[in-house]
Each structure stands twice: as structure tokens, then as C-alpha cells.
Image (tube, rainbow, N blue to C red):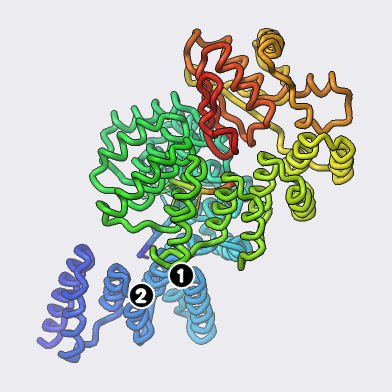
Amino acid sequence: MAAIGLEMKFDGYYTLLNECINRRAFREGQRVHAHMIKTCYLPPMHLRTRLIVFYNNCDRLGDARRVLDEMPERNVVSWTAMVSAYSKRGYASEALNLFLQMFRSGLLVLTISANFAGTEPNEFTFATLLTSCTGASGLDLGRQIHSLIIRRNFESHIFVGSSLLDMYAKAGRIYEARGVFNCLPERDVVSCTAIISGYAQLGLDEEALELFRQLQREGMISNYVTYASVLTALSGLAALDLGRQVHNHVLRRELPSYVVLLNSLIDMYSKCGNLSYSRRIFDSMPERTVISWNAMLVGYSKHGMGKEVVKLFKLMKEESKVRPDSVTFLAVLSGCSHGGMEDRGLEYFYEMEKGENGIEPELEHYGCVVDLLGRAGRVEEAFEFIKKMHFEPTAAIWGSLLGACRVHSNIDIGEFVGFRLLQIEPENAGNYVILSNLYASAGRWEDVRTVRELMSEKAVIKEPGRSWIELDQILHTFHASDRSHPRREEVSAKVKELSIKLKEAGYVPDLGCVLYDVDDEQKEKILLGHSEKLALAFGLIATAEGVPVRVTKNLRICVDCHNFAKLVSEIYRREVSLRDKNRFHHIVRGICSCGDYW
DNA sequence: TGGAGGTACC
């Protein structure tokens, strides 16, 4: 009779707890737990595990841990429930420590008892644990766990495999990730999405897109996470037509309005140059997270629309329950800078410094201030600001100041900063180019030569410049002095024609942009071979008159190409929208939205 | 008890 009573008690508690888990009803669940204690009921292992799940579900990791610690015996499910909670909330070292504790307890039991299955990790444990292998030591740990997985024969389990390939991809080891993926005996939408997103997150956008297409051909049914991942790749490629096509798929599939997917769409449209679509999606969202606001703010920022940034930020503070985070402030500060609203940006930064927003300025925010001061021509002040920072200045910070020195022709500071930068980042060719630009603008040709010699001494490997244009869902890519495009003859003839016409209108090639030791004629030839000029020329011949030309470049646009594009927009009456590594340049009738500062 | 996902200075 007593046994039946206990069983009924168990059933009752179990049902009640599950309801509380589903509804995340903390108080109610706590009362259920209290009732067990008050009535001296000793819950069996299974029920205690539900308590762990319940507390974790209500964000009460400490309470959950107490339940685990007080358990007279534990099985793999109770251990794994707690490891999972730590992993999900980002407590990686706690997750790993608990796993080790579990693992050691398993070994201990192994030595004293034949029945050790209770604490032997299973596929659930490994799949969840691998998500905690991030950061600096993540790869080492991940590899060690991988060897445990192989020894226990879990490698081809689909969840373990997905988690494993994701771990490698997040550590930048895409080949190893792909190896795990290729060896999976079966695939599902999660493992496929993990590998696609792995490529996209490493900036291997074309590979991500190609794999997405291949897996679709092979029958993968995408879900909203797959679409979000491929949209990230399309944002990187600025592939508007392809992005629209994915958007249409999403609409046809009638996927519910997942915030994550809508955020990806906002980002994709803005990075593909279509801000009004981004805003339309943003306005139609039933709920927004801080990432939705940030994506929209970043969009306006990259397009140099400072006023819109300020307006939207105000709206966010007034009307939204979402609190700005450190990324919001990065977007707002860089938006003010890109939009030529230096004073406003500085005001925001001082507010941050005073602690008015609850967000401490980080190194990146200081970087924005250097940019703001530099753009405003306050180069000395920017230099003093860097010296007073309580962060060690990074190459990005010095790079920002060097850019300001170039635009405002401040040779003294520029020279100091330039050489400082060459010490920190001797392999970055861009730094030599800007320093050389600076000397060239002052007519210091001897110094231009010194910089050039330094560059050849240090054997700089320059990331090859690459520009592309999307036409009818096809990306046409050009490399510097590229002769590989099927329409290369036409393109090169068009560049020559442009050069002649532009020179008549006053174009003077900026030879300081070339760091090769060749004669001026050769330098001019090199400049005309820059990838963005090839893409621009191709855009002019491949699209109808009057149609805006959209070019995307993997690096920052050079001074000469910027001048060139401005003149093209004026003479050929074409709007040119050029996205470089940092921002958009919207050029209309010879005037660029960047105000010639970038 | 479980695996994938959106924003970020230069």
C-alpha cells in the first residue's frame, strides 16, 4: 500500500514539474520542490533529474547544481542535464569541469564495480559538451574530446558529428569540419546547416553558397536557420538578386516570422545596398531583439546616413523595451563618423564615459572616437587621445589615425604613426600604401622610395584585390590586371576609353598609390588594372544606360579608383554604388556620400 | 539529457 502511495506521489510530482518546465513557472515549481522536502519525500533519481532540468530552464543554475550535488546517486542523464545547462548559458569551464568530474567518477566506479554504465558519457553528453569548446583553448579541448568520441565509437552519430564539425569550423579549421561532415553516414538539416554556416562565418561566402546549392540539389529541406546562414554568405557577397531569391523561398515556404531570419534579411538587404527593404522588414517585425536594432543601425551607418542613425537610436531609447548594448554604441559612433556628424558622435562617447548608458566603452569604441576626431580634422587631438587611452593601441587604431593624417596631410604625426604601424603589422601592404600616399602628397619622393624598399624587404603578402558585380544572379569577379573574364577584350578596351575621356575632364592618375619600382607609364598601367576599375567598366558595358552600377570590393578602395569612379559617375551620368571593406560609397554626379573621407 | 542560426571600430 505504501509503495502504491509513493508511486502516486512520484507521478503527481513528475506531471506537475513537467508542466512547470514547459511554462517556465518558477514559483510554482519551487513550491512542488518545497512540498517534497516538507513531506520528507525522497525523490528517486529520475525525479531529481527533472528538478535539475526545471531549475536550469528557469535560469537558476545554482539551485540546479545543488540538486545534482545532493543526489545520492547520479546517472548519465542527470550529469548531462547539468553539463548542458552550463554549455547553453555560456559557462564553458563549468561545463568542462563537471564533465571531468563525471568522467572521473565513471573511472572510479569502473575499478570497484562492473556496473559503470551509470556515468559513462553518451552521445548526448558529447554533443552538448563540444558546444563549450570555444575560445583560445577550445580547439585543444575539442581534439581531446574528439579522441574520446572515436574511442567510444560515437563519431558517426549524427548529433555528435554535427557538434564536432561545428567545433572545428568555429576554430577556423574548415577542412577538418568538412572531413567530419563528409564522413557522416547520414545527414540532416542541422548537420548541413552547420557546415554551410561554418563556411559563411569564416567569410568563405562563395563556398557556403555553392555547398547550399549542392545540398539543395541533393534533397536538403532548408529550415529558417539554413536560410539565415546562407543569407550571411549572400550579405558578404553583396548578391542582391540571389538574396531576393532566398527571400522569395522563405515567403513561399510560409515560415513563421522567426526573429533570427528577419534579422538576417535586414542585414542582407542593407549589405546588398537596398536599405529601404531592410527598413520595411524592420518596421513589419512583430518583435525585435537588440540584434534587429543593431542590424538596422549598422545598415544606416555603412551607408553614411548619420541622421537616420541618430533618429533610429532615439526611437530605440524612447519606444523600445530593448536596451542598447555595446554593439549598438559601435553602430551609433561609427554611424556618426561615416555620416559626418563628428560632434554628435563625440557627445555619445562622452555620455558612455560618464556611465550614463550602463555600457562601458571598450577598445573598439575608442577606435570610433579616433575616427571621429580624425574625420573632423582634429588629428593632434586624436593622437593625444590614443596616448591617454588605458588600452594598448592596436593596428586598427593606428590605421585609423594614419588614414586621417593622409586626408588632412599631417606629415609629422603621419610619419610617426606610419612607422609605428609598420612595426606592429609589417605584413600589411595597405599601411605601406597609405604612408606612401602621404609622402607623395607632400612631394617627398625620396621617402616614397624608402617605403617601397621597406615593403619589398619585408616580403609583404598582400591580400589580392578583388571586385565583383552581380548581374542576373551571376557574380562577375575581377582581380587586378585580370585577363580571365570571357569579355576581357571589351572590358580592357572600355577601361582605355574611360581613361582617355576622364583625362580630358581633368583626371590625373594618382601614382602615389603604386608601390612598385617602375616608370610612370607602367604605374599608370597598374592603376588602370585595379580590380574595381575593371568591374566598373564591365558594369558600364553590361547594363543599360542610366542604370546604377553596383560594385563590391574585398579591400578598401584606393584613392585613385575613388577619383576615377567619381568622374565616371559625372561624365557617364551613372550612379555608382561601391561597397568596400568598410562602407558604401554612393557616388552621384561626381560627389561621394563618404565626403572623400574613408 | 542533445547538434546548426542573426548585429560589431579600422
Lateral position of residue A368 relative to residue A262, left or right? right
Residue at the image position 86 percent from the left and 35 percent from the top: A445
Give the mark nearer the N terminus: 2 vs 1.
2
- Determine whether the residue tagged by mark 2 lies in a helix, strand or loop: helix
Depth check: give the residue in front, B1 or A453.
Answer: A453
Mark 2 to mark 1 CA distance (whole Å): 10 Å
- Amino acid, disc 2: Leu
Residues under numbered marks 2 and 1 in contact, where contact means CB atoms less than 8 Å apart: yes
* Quarter of the rendering occupied by the N terminus of chain A: bottom left
Depth check: give the residue in front, A200 or A7.
Answer: A200
Q: Chain of mark 1?
A: A
Please, is residue A231 above or below residue A116 in the view?
A: above
Please, is residue A511 above or below residue A490 in the view?
A: below
Residue at the image position 36 percent from the left and 49 percent from the top: A313
Mark 2 = which residue? Answer: A61
- Determine whether the residue tagged by mark 1 lies in a helix, strand or loop: loop
- Amino acid, disc 1: Tyr
Residue at the image position 75 percent from the left and 31 percent from the top: A513
Residue at the image position 15 percent from the left and 90 percent from the top: A39
Res. A187 in view = no
Depth check: give the residue in front, A38 or A10.
Answer: A38
Q: Chain of mark 2?
A: A
Depth check: give the residue in front, A29 or A458.
Answer: A458
Mark 1 = which residue? Answer: A91
Task: Determine which quarter of the picture holds residue A537.
Answer: top right
